[in-house]
Image: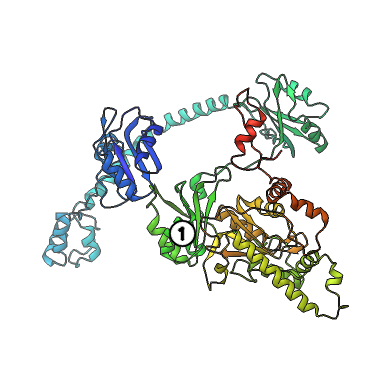
Amino acid sequence: MSRIVVKNLPKKIKEERLREYFSSKGTVTDLQLKYTKEGVFRRFAFVGFKDEAQAAAAKEYFNNSYLDTSKLQVEICAALGGAEKPRSWSKYSADSSAYLRLHPEQKKPKPVKEKPPKENFADAFLKDLEGNEEFEEFLQVHGTHNKAVWTNDTRAPSDGDVKKAKPGKAAEKVKKEEEKEEENDEEEGDSDECADKTETMQKKVKQEVPHQSPQQKPKPKLPVQEFSFTLKVKGLPYNCKKKQIKDFFKPAKVASLRLPPKVRGIAYLGFKKEQDMKQALNKHHSFMAGHRLDVTKYTKQMAPEKKWRQFEDLGNPQESLADTGRIFVRNLSYAITEDELEALFKKYGPLEEVHLSIDRVTRKPKGFAFVSFLFPEHAIRAFTELDGQMLQGRLLHLLPAKAKKSDEKDGEGPEPKSFKDKKEAELKKASGRGHNWNTLFLGANALADVMAERYATSKQELLGTETGESVAVRMALGETQVVAETRDFLETNGVVLDAFSRPATERSKTVILVKNLPAKTPPNDLRAVFGKFGMLTRVVLPPWGVTALIEFQDPTEARAAFRRLAYSKFKHVPLYLEWAPTGVFAAGKKEPVKTEEKPKVDVKEEPAEETAEQKGPDAEEEEEEEEVPPEPDTTLFVKNLNFSTTEQAVREHFEQCGTVHE
């Protein structure tokens, strides 16, 4: 386990100090000081490390050591819900006996065993005597006189007579009849008194209840009139009146004005006409008695549902996972990488996608990710086994995720009608399935532009047939020459071209091969297009600018750029994108120079070029460096300088890192 629990901490320990204290034995990924509901520190904390080795080293080093005057007790955390978890003893733990003593209402009642009801002795005895002739004769002789005098005593008793003759039933019946007769006598005696009482009560009721005519009806409550044009005003002075607010918004006619009773500084204005509402909106960011007002449109919103209602539709997590195969993972370490997350989940089955959300400002993970499995049954198994487990010192929390929304407009927009549109949609959809084009693919038009500029001629003469030579042969020779120069440039800038020829090699997640570019494409144009999706590590563009390699810092941003830009229009041509193979850049190579220098042209040298050569190679390199314009976002703002610092001193100091432009 990569998580430890530290007990017997000092009462006034701070999180920053404790993090610094334990970081000497490894990277601390999580630190939680535990407090009661009243804010009292419970003097223990959980510390998470990058891996199990660091946690074991911290436990070995800090156990039984002293922090201030407290002797620390350090233990490796048990798995959540594991059998090796020690029994809770604190009065703050819900499963401890001390907690149950303080909260007796939460004790679970012991199950009481239900005993079978005892059978009455008399009923059991009578049950045994059923059908006994002597006992029936005894009952007939000693029974109650519930028969007529003229009945035949010698008649054999029937079953009904035997049932009526059960002891105690007749006596109870006689007793009830006597009680009824006594009650009737009492009612006859008291009837006069009751009549008098009812008459007096009726008179009192008539006097107390006011006389209502049948025409009088309760007044119905008038409905509150609601206006469709409503504004919300914030930042009002606390002591302002309704009349002051209406005067402030003139000439707009305020139809209704409401001030919330428990909230000050806010008002709701209702208008009958949209024109009045627009006039009132012009008062946005204006001042009223020194207070700046915020005037915005108000739309009535439903009350937010409770959190537990938001998960009502979720139902059984395994049922939703069986449909989507997608898991939402949270409470991740802020130092985790996409490869580490993929290595954890791919043990349960093939993965379709791992999306780790990255903060664009800090360039660190946000602490949550989405994992999509190819088969839903593998997602169910991963969800069951990994929920609550430790990863880099943190407890994973897994939830079923909704299905990913398709990038295509499924049912939202008009379907492509023409064959060309359908073909483009199919190509864009299949763009991520491996490579579809030659690695050094060159468009015919771009190749013609390159050759025309190289030989200082026009495209019409290059593609013409006046010379009698084959145009196809001419273009093939030109393509071979351009491809050879491109290969040399890529190898010089640390690109391993052999990686493209490996069969069925694994593809990179951050490097994109961009093909079918127009001739002489500048690197800044590619940076402007691809830089919108994330931070670029490097852009490798050969001199003729027809093929490029673009590397992103984060795989998530690279996928977003690939998905949006594949087969999209760049200038006047579609972009052909392909994931580059892994290991396409040689290890240890520096970032390539994004040069825009023109390639050499095989023409006769002019005298001006000879004078440039006479200056020497060093002077020529300096001129080339000065001609290269600075890239965007390369300006630094330096403050806290000494007042005696000169511009030349600052330039010399920063020129140690590279060329400084004006």
Residue 90, quarter of the rendered image: top left
Kindly identify the residue that appears in the image at 44 percent across and 56 percent down: 340
- The image quadrant where one finds the C terminus is top right
340 versus 576 height, above or below: above
Left of 84 or right of it: where is 18? right
* Whole-percent x, y for residue 520 in the image: 75, 59
Rendering colour mode: rainbow
> Which quadrant of the view contains residue 345?
bottom left
Q: Can you give x and y, in whole percent of width and height, for residue 516 in the image?
A: 71, 65
| Left or right of 309 in this view: 418 | right
Name the residue at the right extreme. 466
Q: What residue would you read off at disc 1?
A: 342
Amino acid marked by disc 1: Glu
Pick out the residue farthest to the front. Answer: 614
Residue 127 visible from this viewpoint: yes
Q: Residue at x 69, y 40 (%)?
A: 661
Label total for image: 1
Q: Which residue is at 56% across, 72% downward?
A: 501
Question: At numbered mark 1, what does the secondary structure look like: helix, strand or loop?
Answer: helix
- Measuring from the top left, give residue 106's x and y in whole percent: 31, 40
Left or right: 78 in relation to 500:
left
Of residue 130 and residue 230, the one placed in the foreground of this image is 230
Instruction: Determine if residue 95 is in view.
Output: no
Relative to the observer, which residue lies in front, 100 or 216? 100
